[in-house]
Image: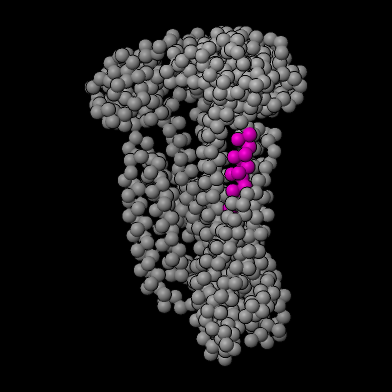
């Protein structure tokens, strides 16, 4: 029997290649994801550990530390340096400042001092040298790339008074990963003296020390604790390393889990391709299997022979998948590095390909298990081949749909009822996250029900498309696609799964895009907004007053966010505007009350916050010692707890108002928008931190972010679509072999080679369209359910179908189907008519 199995594998090697590729692609995605997760973990651990290298002791603010907001007292540094056993110590501090670019506009930058102890520098010098003098600076490699700066250039930093301080760039460096380095701001390294010129007030968040030779970390910690007194947390270098590395696990694990979800989709699709392949092979080998039974093979031997072929295919595909996984991981690392601005390791981070036994075991386990399980049902069907089948001509391999229709309908109905109940339960959830996950899971259950009903609805859809076809080859293609509903359903199901998920994500993203655009238009009827590009450098009151005097400006409205405290509220942050702008330039959706004539000491409160606190219109809410009267309830959650007048917001602040991050601008009616923009741009050119923004630009920025996420999702699900198209090509290839005699007969009756090729191409297009169209319809429906689940009483997402993107997807499916059919069609057209007629 073993010789028979090996002979069969040699004879059918070409037929199994496409199926092996499908599994290999799925395994490549799984192993590539695992390798990527390990690589990101290693790189991130290296970067995080860099901040703790050579550190023997570290001092942090503790829970009981006095004046926590002011950081560690500056005189602690000298105390620690004077402590016995300390070879060197440095403070780690930073401040925010504005970095002037070559265009004269400021960018937000974090400025840090260079540690005086060389061992305690958590930077890797890339070019030049570290700053020593007060007018020297170094920048990290990412800042150098984005701001287009290099060694020898000049840069300017603005202090709180917007005074300029010039520095010469003497080096570039790469910094380890930390909450500071990953903040998204530019990074500038200066000498301690240079830092004081820009940021006079120190705020030390950590002091690190290195021990003298022979002094243990524990002894050093004990001595430092004695020197500075209680109330501060002192860690050994080992404890600091473990604490920083503990931050790594979650991020790497989340990335791995996210990607593995898409790998699972690819494997499900690949499993369906394998199932379909073995189903066709078993049907084609009816006579062969029957002859084996005639010469003495029992049912179990036939069953094991089919599974042995699957096992061999799974092993071969797993080897290819493991090798392909390394390429997938390298590609994803390059993608993350490019799109993510360098990722955790910076733009110069090397591509790592760590291969663990877990990855190898997962690759072979997944590849072999998926392949063997997918072949179980076809193998079981092979055992039912009667020996007498060898004595007659090979029957048509089509299955009787009616025979299993009732069972399928009952099972699919039960699954659909479970999915429907889960959808209802998900829609009842008030919180967005559980609602989204429950409803999303329920849609996958409903998708399973639709897959089970495939042999019942696929012929109907095929006939519907067939009515639009003209010509003998096209009509024959429609008949071929509908001849074996189970096979066509299994082939189209693989593509349908991928298209459903892509369409669902596209619809949800499109709905979110449309809703955000509506909200931008609704929330800010203002024509423009002038913003500060540097958080630590707000726009001053004088700037706002001068802005109001610009030609054709009818009204300006500074925006001020105030963070208060309230015994009734979990969060008490409010947004302030001038009283005359509330209701005109700022118009949130109202759930009760009115915004007209809002006064100082009054609050337009977020409806959900009011409900949680048991507050209604007319009630008062204490915030930072002031009782604010609720005069309106708003649905919008963009304003924090609610909207107040500018004077009320100022009164809630503990410190004097330095300025505003945002100023809304309303133009006079009938103003030429081009002229007005030019006037505004000339005015804001007088401020290094001011930038001009409009609703159109805000929408463009939001849409760009959505498109970037959508492209990433499309790329991930794209592998499943590629596997599905391999399935269509595989089905057609096996179908060509199965229908050799039939194709020869058609040629003998007058069908030309071109018409035969056309028949197979149309058949491929029909299968692709069935899968794609059903997938689009399901994706749109499931997308609507997710939109309903995410929406709530205070924030309603508008359902929107991006027809352009959906149309592109259908067009790509047709093009891919033509490509998938090219090789099978060419092979069918080259077959000899005489040899084909002679085939038994």
Depicted 316 relative to depicted 750: above or below? above
**Along the line of sight, which residue is nearer the eye, 785 or 231?**
231
> Where the N terminus falls, by quadrant?
bottom right
Q: Horizontal and vertical percent for residue 698?
A: 52, 30
**Which residues are the magenta region?**
29-46
Q: Report the residue at 40% width, 73% height from top.
A: 405
Depicted 332 relative to depicted 594: above or below? below
**Along the line of sight, which residue is nearer the eye, 137 or 681?**
137
Q: Report the residue at 55% width, 36% height from top.
A: 248
Q: Horizontal and vertical percent for residue 602?
A: 30, 17
Q: Is residue 30 magenta?
A: yes
Depicted 470 relative to depicted 581: above or below? below
Report the number of numbered marks. 0
Question: Residue most toward the bottom?
Answer: 391
Q: Horizontal and vertical percent for residue 529?
A: 50, 22
Q: Report the residue at 32% width, 55% height from top.
A: 421
Q: Quadrant of residue 319?
A: bottom right
Q: Main secondary structure of the magenta part?
A: helix
Q: Report the residue at 65% width, 37% height from top.
A: 338
Please indicate whether residue 478 sits to the left or right of residue 211 in the image: left
Q: Horizontal and vertical percent for residue 408?
A: 40, 70
Please indicate whether residue 137 sits to the left or right of residue 609 in the image: right
């Amino acid at each position: 029997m073993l010789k028979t199995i090996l002979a069969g594998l040699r004879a059918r090697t070409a037929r199994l290649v496409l199926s092996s590729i499908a599994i290999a692609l799925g395994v490549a995605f799984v192993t590539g994801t695992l390798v990527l997760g390990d690589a990101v973990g290693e790189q991130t651990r290296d970067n995080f550990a860099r901040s703790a290298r050579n550190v023997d002791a570290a001092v942090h603010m503790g829970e009981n530390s006095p004046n926590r907001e002011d950081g560690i007292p500056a005189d602690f540094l000298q105390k620690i340096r004077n402590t016995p056993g300390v070879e060197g110590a440095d403070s780690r501090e930073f401040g925010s400042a504005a970095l002037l670019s070559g265009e004269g506009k400021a960018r937000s930058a974090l400025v840090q001092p260079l540690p005086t102890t060389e061992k305690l520098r958590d930077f890797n010098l890339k070019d030049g040298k570290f700053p020593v003098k007060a007018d020297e600076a170094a920048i990290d490699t990412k800042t150098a790339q984005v701001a287009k700066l290099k060694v020898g250039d000049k840069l300017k930093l603005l202090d709180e008074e917007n005074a300029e301080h010039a520095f010469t760039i003497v080096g570039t460096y790469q910094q380890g990963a930390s909450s500071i380095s990953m903040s998204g701001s530019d990074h500038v390294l200066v000498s301690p003296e240079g830092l004081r010129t820009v940021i006079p007030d120190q705020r030390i968040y950590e002091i690190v020390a290195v021990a003298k030779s022979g002094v243990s970390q524990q002894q050093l910690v004990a001595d430092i604790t004695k020197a500075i007194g209680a109330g501060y947390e002192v860690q050994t270098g080992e404890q600091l390393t473990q604490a920083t590395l503990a931050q790594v696990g979650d991020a790497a694990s989340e990335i791995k889990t996210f990607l593995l979800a898409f790998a699972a989709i690819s494997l499900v699709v690949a499993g369906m391709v394998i199932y379909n392949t073995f189903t066709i092979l078993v049907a084609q080998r009816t006579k062969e299997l029957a002859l084996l039974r005639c010469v003495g093979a029992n049912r179990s031997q036939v069953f094991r022979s089919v599974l042995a072929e699957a096992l061999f295919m799974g092993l071969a595909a797993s080897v290819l998948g493991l090798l392909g996984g390394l390429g997938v991981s390298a590609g994803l690392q390059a993608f993350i590095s490019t799109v993510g601005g360098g990722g955790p390791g910076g733009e110069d981070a090397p591509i790592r390909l760590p291969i663990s036994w877990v990855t190898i075991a997962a690759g072979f386990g997944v590849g072999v298990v998926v392949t063997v399980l997918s072949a179980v049902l076809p193998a079981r069907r092979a055992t039912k081949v009667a020996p007498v089948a060898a004595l007659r001509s090979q029957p048509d391999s089509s299955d009787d749909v009616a025979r299993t229709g009732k069972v399928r309908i009952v099972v699919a109905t039960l699954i659909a009822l479970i999915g429907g109940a889960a959808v209802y339960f998900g829609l009842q959830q008030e919180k967005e996250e559980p609602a989204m996950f429950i409803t999303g899971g329920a849609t996958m259950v409903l998708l399973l029900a639709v897959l089970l009903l495939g042999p019942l609805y696929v012929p109907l859809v095929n006939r519907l498309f067939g009515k639009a076809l003209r010509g003998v080859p096209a009509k024959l293609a429609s008949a071929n696609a509908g001849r074996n509903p189970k096979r066509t359903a299994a082939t189209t199901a693989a593509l349908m799964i991928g298209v459903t998920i892509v369409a669902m994500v596209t619809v949800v993203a499109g709905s979110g895009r449309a809703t955000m655009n509506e909200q931008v238009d609704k929330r800010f009827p203002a024509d423009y907004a002038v913003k500060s590009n540097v958080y630590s450098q707000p726009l001053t009151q004088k700037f706002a007053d001068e802005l109001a005097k610009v030609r054709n400006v009818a009204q300006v409205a500074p925006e001020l966010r105030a963070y208060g405290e309230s015994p009734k509220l979990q969060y008490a942050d409010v947004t302030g505007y001038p009283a005359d702008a509330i209701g005109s330039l700022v118009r949130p959706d109202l759930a009760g009350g009115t915004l007209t004539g809002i006064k100082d000491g009054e609050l337009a409160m977020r409806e959900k916050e009011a409900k949680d606190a048991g507050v209604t219109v007319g009630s008062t809410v204490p915030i930072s010692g002031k009782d604010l009267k609720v005069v309106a309830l708003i649905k919008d959650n963009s304003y924090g707890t609610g909207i107040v007048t500018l004077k009320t917001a100022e009164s809630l602040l503990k410190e004097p108002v330095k300025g505003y991050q945002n100023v809304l601008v309303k133009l006079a009616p009938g103003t030429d928008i081009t002229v007005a923009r030019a006037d505004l741009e000339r005015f804001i050119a007088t401020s290094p931190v001011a930038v001009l923004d409009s609703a159109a630009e805000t929408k463009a920025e939001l849409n760009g972010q959505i498109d970037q996420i959508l492209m990433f999702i499309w790329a991930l699900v794209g592998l499943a679509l590629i596997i599905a198209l391999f399935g269509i090509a595989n089905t057609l290839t096996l179908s060509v072999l199965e229908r050799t005699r039939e194709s020869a007969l058609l040629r003998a009756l007058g069908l030309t080679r071109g018409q035969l090729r056309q028949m197979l191409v149309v058949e491929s297009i029909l299968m692709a369209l069935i899968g794609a169209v059903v997938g689009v319809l399901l994706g749109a429906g499931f997308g609507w359910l997710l939109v309903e689940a995410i929406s709530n009483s205070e924030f309603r997402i508008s359902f929107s179908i991006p027809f352009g993107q959906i149309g592109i997807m259908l067009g790509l499916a047709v093009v891919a189907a033509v490509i998938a059919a090219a090789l099978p069609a060419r092979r069918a057209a080259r077959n000899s008519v005489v040899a084909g007629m002679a085939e038994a």
